[in-house]
Image (cartoon, rainbow, N blue to C red):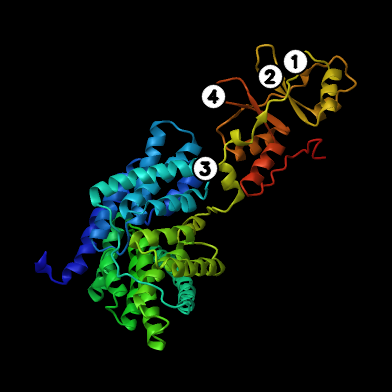
Amino acid sequence: MPALGRWFLLLTPVAAGLLYGPLIHRFAREARGHGVPEVMYAVAETGGRIRPQVAAVKALASAICIGGGGSVGREGPIVQIGSALGSAVGQVARLPAARMRILVACGAAGGIAATFNAPLAGVFFALELILADFAVESFAAVVLSAVAASVVGRAILGDHPFLTLPAFTVTHPDQFLGFAALGVAAAGAGVLFSRLLYAIEDVCDRLWRGPQWLRPAAGGLLLGALLLVLPQMYGVGYPVLGSAAAGAYTVTFLLVLLLAKILATSLTIGIGGSGGVFAPSLFIGAMLGAATGQILHIADPALAPAPGAYALVGMGAVFAGAARTPITAVLIMFELTGQYRIILPLMLAIAVAAGLSRLLSPDTIYTRKLTRRGVDLLSPTRRLRQTSIAVAAGPLPEPIPPEANVAAVAARFAAGTADTLPVRDGAGHIVGVITAEDVEQVLAAADVTAAQLARPVPSLAADADLESAMTQLARHHVGGLPVVTADRPPITWVTHHDLLRAAAAIGRPAPHRRPAAATPAEA
């Protein structure tokens, strides 16, 4: 539309907002924003269930938003799209929650692997951020997904690095001091980006009083005004990033672009846009790194003979400072650029940025959105909700027959350490459980049988989570409960001790759920 001239920059975000605003509001409101927190929430709280229409809505809305000038990236959308497809497959196959979560991670890994030609980064992004789990079972499935996606992606798009940048090398050990300093600055930039992103979103929430579907179009005027001043903020911005790494801009203009990108991305998300924050993190890091490299080169050319190398390292360091995923940051920068020679300064800057970022802020750019909703991904109960009872359950103790008298039941408890035992009839059905406390109260009544002492209790499903098992044990004031698989008879047994061992195995203490009346073992 050349007739519009520069006014194209002002009007296009408004027109795009009129398209994707109603689309998101009507069909999938979770497609708003940068997508990754929604996937993390689905894995942590809903068993990996994501509505299938999210994939289509996110793809279309993000394409319109980015194409219409939204200063966001493709990483968030492709993670949410791939995850939604994986979840849809799991829901159609009626898989349990534990398998569904793995399929969600497979979708995310496949999306990143194919989009960025980065299979290793896709794998570790899914494991480090989405699942927060490096179990062999998860690793194998996610790797297969990333490999399959990469094969297809390379067949269609070709096998070449996603970003084409000049080759850089480190010529002297003293240069590592400059890269360490860049890591410090990158930590601050990453945390600043995260804080301003949500601060501007809060401001937009407070100021907007109209219908939500119209918000992207109205906010598009502000975004368009910014684009009129700095057209470099239009869309993802990879060409501008490449120019910065090649040394095309002055230090002052690099810093202006850095701050403008933070503002433009925050504004795009704040007005209800759809897109990721990974590409903006790379952009911010490139501006910061290029500026640092030029400053060091002016101060001492030996410290930065190639200032562009600092742009490359800054990209990974700012992403690590914002997302705090150091393994993914190292791998994705290597795969995006194909430059292995820069790996040591990259690792140094990313380690410094990730560590210092943890000191500056307890949240990341992804977890902050969930924390504001009251979802704490580090909560002990979250890990318990992700682990099935089958992992903790042990063998079923020798059941007590219903006709056994009190003396026989007491002898069973005296011969072992269990404080709760099952009662099973001749047909193989569990009719209840008996606790040692129940037996103590009727020791003098010789005519009481196990059937009369048995407490009716529910059987737990093997694919239910550990937190539900703790709740049931506490609710019924017993030390153990039977565990069933599908409609089969009880085949396993779970106790407080089993749950505590499982909680310790996943690296989190079990939450304190003490029943109203203590069992004999607790007493």
- Amino acid type of disc 3? Val
User: Which residue corresponds to the image point at 53% horizontal and 52% vertical from the top-left?
Assistant: 375
Q: Which residue is mark 2?
A: 431
In the rendered structure, are the residues bearing label 1 and label 3 in contact, judged by CB atoms less than 8 Å apart? no
Q: How many marks?
A: 4
Point out the frontmost of discs 4 and 3: 3
Mark 4 vs 3, N-terminal side: 3
Task: Find residue 211 and report its image quarter.
Answer: bottom left
Residue reaching furthest to the front:
171
Residue reaching furthest to the bottom:
299
- Amino acid type of disc 4? Ala
Q: Position of residue 359 (x, y in %)?
A: 56, 68
| Residue 301 vertical position relative to residue 324 in the rendered view, above or below | below
Q: What distance separates the C-alpha of mark 4 from that of mark 2?
A: 18 Å
* Nearer to us in this view, 244 or 45: 244
Mark 4 vs 2, N-terminal side: 2
Q: What distance separates the C-alpha of mark 2 from that of mark 3?
A: 39 Å
Q: Which residue is mark 4?
A: 486
Callout 3: SS:
helix
- Amino acid type of disc 1? Pro
Task: Find residue 480 and report its image quarter.
Answer: top right
Q: What distance separates the C-alpha of mark 4 from that of mark 3?
A: 26 Å
For disc 2, the neighbor class at 10 Å (few under 14, some 14 to 19, many from 20) is some
User: Which residue corresponds to the image point at 59% horizontal and 52% vertical from the top-left?
Assistant: 379
Residue reaching furthest to the left:
3
- Amino acid type of disc 2? Val
Point out the frontmost of discs 4 and 1: 4
Q: Quadrant of the N terminus?
A: bottom left
Point out the frontmost of discs 1 and 3: 3
Q: Which residue is mark 3?
A: 136
Q: Which residue is mark 1?
A: 402
User: Which residue corresponds to the image point at 51% horizontal and 57% vertical from the top-left?
Assistant: 371
